[in-house]
Amino acid sequence: MVRIDPAPLLALPGVRPVLAALPGARIVGGAVRDLLAGRPVADVDVTTPSQPQATIRALKAAGLRAIPTGIAHGTVTALAEGGSIEVTTLRRDVETDGRHAVVAFTEDFAEDAARRDFTINAMSLGADGTLYDYFEGRSDLEAGRLRFVGTPAARIAEDYLRVLRFFRFQSRYGRLAPDEETAAALRAAAGKLDTLSAERLWSEMSKILSAKDPGDGLALMAELGIFAVLLPEAAPDWPARLDRLAEADAPAEPLLRLAALIGDARRADRLALRWKLSNAERERLSALLTGDLPAADADAVVLRQALAETAADVLIGRSFLRHLPGEAAAVFRRKMALIPEPVFPLQGRDAVAIGLQPGPALGAALRAVRAWWIERGCVDDADACRAELARLAGVAGRPAS
Ligand code: ATP
Ligand code: MG
């Protein structure tokens, strides 16, 4: 029996009480992998031989809250110490069709491990620190080898999302290229990716694009004929575009990287519709690829003017995409993050207060004054703006009392 120190996981909110309430349950999957890899662990998943209703009873008997989040799939969410932990009954696959699986509960940990995708994701850990490593996941993790549990082609045919999951985990943990059998199976599955729902594609792609350094993973995807199928909207020189972001120390933001890969607002919009991005995501993607951007060495007035029109994070994103990497661009971004967003000092009621009638003309006058205020560098205060408004509207300006 191999033992490791489970303390870092047991110290996370809720883990200790949940395991204490469920004798025989174990921590499973990503948390065990990341503990062994020395990476921070955010979510802890627990797996248990007990059936969901029995799990709920046991949690409640221990004074913990239990929410039946996915009883049909065996999942209960336990709430303790401010943490929330997914507790799932051990499962085995009964039927798979590449997209959905019919599962049955089991009491056999090895069966549950066998349906997991990669050896490094199939380990479990008892509260006493016993490591259950059915498929040599630990040595694969140490070697930087991402290996399917079982035969790659068969495991991929059960669930084509695993093709993308391969690149998510390869980007994070892989230091070795996939073996020939795995590479061939991935390549052969490229044509099946269109059977996956748009939501699953984007959700998985955004994880791949969140990796610290997604470049190698994407290059491997391209080599295996998967990238072209997945993202035909990408610009032909996408690797260089991604390199430029990395050179500039851009944040690991999926939409920013997607914008870099595509490099064109119309193609980006097509993709946003195809992958069913949210409206907010679609607008951000478009804003990153269109709109104005001051020169990297612009002075403070110009920067304030830009900030009056566009949110700082969008301008910073545009700078990563459009400024040449270099000191001036880095300074531009630092300044953008620090300059407070200028706030136009007048509102509709100020216009009413100086005698304008509510209505479209009032709105137009306010917009005109705002344009004047931006033109002058966003420095005029409320009184100065009010005087300009009165002048423009031809009313006798009187100070608001
Ligand atoms: P992350 O840190 O990215 O969340 P994770 O390992 O927790 O990594 P999840 O997608 O949250 O990954 O899945 C949790 C676990 O469930 C995995 O570690 C794996 O064992 C199993 N799993 C999830 N999706 C699949 C799948 N499509 N096929 C097989 N096993 C899967
Ligand atoms: Mg997870």
Image (cartoon, rainbow, N blue to C red):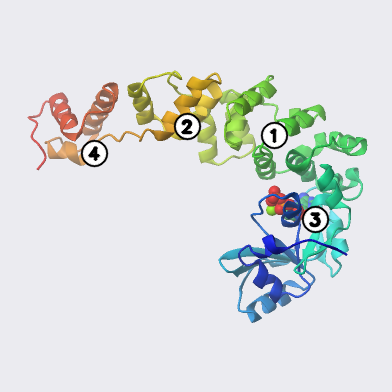
Which residue position holds label 3? Answer: 101
Residue 188 quadrant: top right
Q: Residue at x 67, y 75 (%)?
A: 56
| For the residues bearing labels 2 and 3, Cβ distance under 8 angstroms | no
Q: Earlier in the sequence, mark 4 or mark 1?
A: 1
Q: Residue at x 86, y 37 (%)?
A: 178
Q: Which mark is residue 347?
A: 4
Q: Mark 2 Cα within 10 Å, few/some/many (few <14, many 20+)? A: many
Q: Nearer the viewer, mark 4 or mark 3?
A: 4
Q: Is residue 24 visible?
A: yes
> What's the amino acid at mark 3?
Ala
In three-dimensional space, the C-alpha distance between marks 2 and 1, rounded to whole angstroms, equals 22 Å
Q: Is residue 88 above or below residue 168?
A: below
Q: Is residue 255 above or below residue 107?
A: above
Q: Earlier in the sequence, mark 4 or mark 3?
A: 3
Left or right: 385 in relation to 186: left
Q: Nearer the viewer, mark 3 or mark 1?
A: 1
Q: Mark 1 Cα within 10 Å, few/some/many (few <14, many 20+)? A: many
Q: Nearer the viewer, mark 2 or mark 4?
A: 2
Q: Earlier in the sequence, mark 3 or mark 1?
A: 3
Q: Mark 3 Cα within 10 Å, few/some/many (few <14, many 20+)? A: some
Q: Is residue 100 visible?
A: no
Q: Is residue 297 above or below residue 367?
A: above
Residue 365 quadrant: top left
Nearer to us in this view, 5 or 287: 5
> What's the amino acid at mark 4?
Gln
| For the residues bearing labels 2 and 4, Cβ distance under 8 angstroms | no
In three-dimensional space, the C-alpha distance between marks 3 and 1, rounded to whole angstroms, equals 29 Å
Q: Residue at x 75, y 34 (%)?
A: 217
